Image (cartoon, helix red, strand yellow):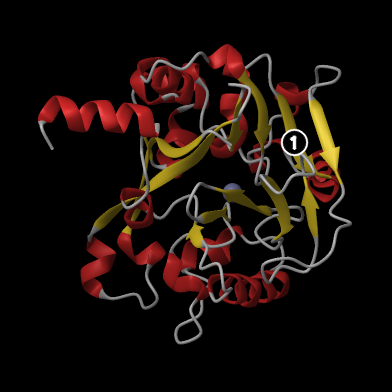
Amino acid sequence: MRDLFFLTCGRLKSPAAALASKPTLANALATTFMSITVAVVVRENGDLALVDAGFSSPVCADPTGTLGALRALTLGVDLAAQDSIARQLRALGLDPARVKTIVATHLHLDHVGGAADFPNAEVVCSDRELRALFRMPRDAGYRVDDFAREGRLHVVDLGGAPMLGFPRSRDLFADGELVLLDAHGHTPGNVAVAVRGADRTFVHIGDAVYQSWEFSAATPGPSPIARLTAQDREALARTYGAIRACAADGCRPVIVPSHDLEVFRALPHAPRAAATTNAAATGA
Ligand SMILES: [Zn+2]
């Protein structure tokens, strides 16, 4: 791996109570924002791999027109044209055509709708998630049409050994750079993805939790929104235990939920080369 950084594809707006451990009058009236976090891996050969891809460019440019007013409202989308991951990559000097791999934590629209902007990328998902794709009602967030092209989907089984606290794994490139981990519960095939950075390992856990407090031992989730969206709450509770074990691993991985804006803010947001250039330009 040559570089690793994180982008957010705009934001999602939510009543604060939906993400809180305890509903109160104050958080019932307040609004909070969630990130839509995407990991960008620059591989040694210059190709790019993404963990999730956010919404597509057409959705970012016109959420109401593409999703419909009701769906845009219930999703709480807060998007603009420049938020698409393809556009952000271009702004950083990276060619979206070099995106060859998108690992989908799961197949909800806010995670893989952006695959439409990366025609050269295969979309990697777990076999359980693919089976669920064809069982789900169309309005559950899945868009079969995005994946219908032959050869687009790379379906993997997580038959590998337990790793980083998770019960099953799949080392995508057989080099430890990107490892899929079984974190189901939110959807039948939600995976966490361990990404080995230069100094730290980051584990993008998709929607296994919405906010980091949900996997804590002291005040375990689910939050109201996680309870509402979970396909299997018992599996979700087991996944919380796996995330706790992961966080306690000796390599001190950084746990990255898709929608935790506070966690997102603390992550690197540009390639190291660009960050160095910016620091030099500002004299920092
Ligand atoms: Zn989801």
Instruction: Report the front residue among 15 and 130.
Output: 130
Label 1, secondary structure: give it. Answer: strand
Residue furthest to the bottom in view is 218
Residue plotted at (72% across, 60% down)? 184
Instruction: Report the front residue among 268 and 122.
Output: 268
Give the total of numbered labels: 1
For residue 32, above or below residue 216: above
Instruction: Report the front residue among 102 and 16.
Output: 102
Which quadrant holds the C terminus? top left
* Res 279 quadrant in image: top left
Residue 171 location in percent, x, y?
77, 48
Which quadrant holds the N terminus? top right
Using residue 8 as the reference point, say whether residue 51 is left or right of it: right
Q: Can residue 62 be seen in this view?
A: no
Residue plotted at (53% across, 47% down)? 197
For residue 223, above or below residue 34: below
Note whether ligand 1 is within 8 Å of mark 1.
Answer: no
| Residue type indicated by callout 1 | Val
Using residue 235 as the reference point, say whether residue 93 is left or right of it: left
Residue 189 location in percent, x, y?
76, 52
Q: Is residue 231 visible?
A: yes
Instruction: Report the front residue among 53 and 6.
Output: 6
For residue 214, above or below residue 150: below
Residue plotted at (51% across, 27% down)? 67
Residue 116 location in percent, x, y?
62, 19
Residue beneath disc 1: 124
Instruction: Tell me the crowding category of disc 1: few under 14, some 14 to 19, or many 20 or more residues within 10 angstroms, Cα based.
Output: many
Residue 113 location in percent, x, y?
59, 29
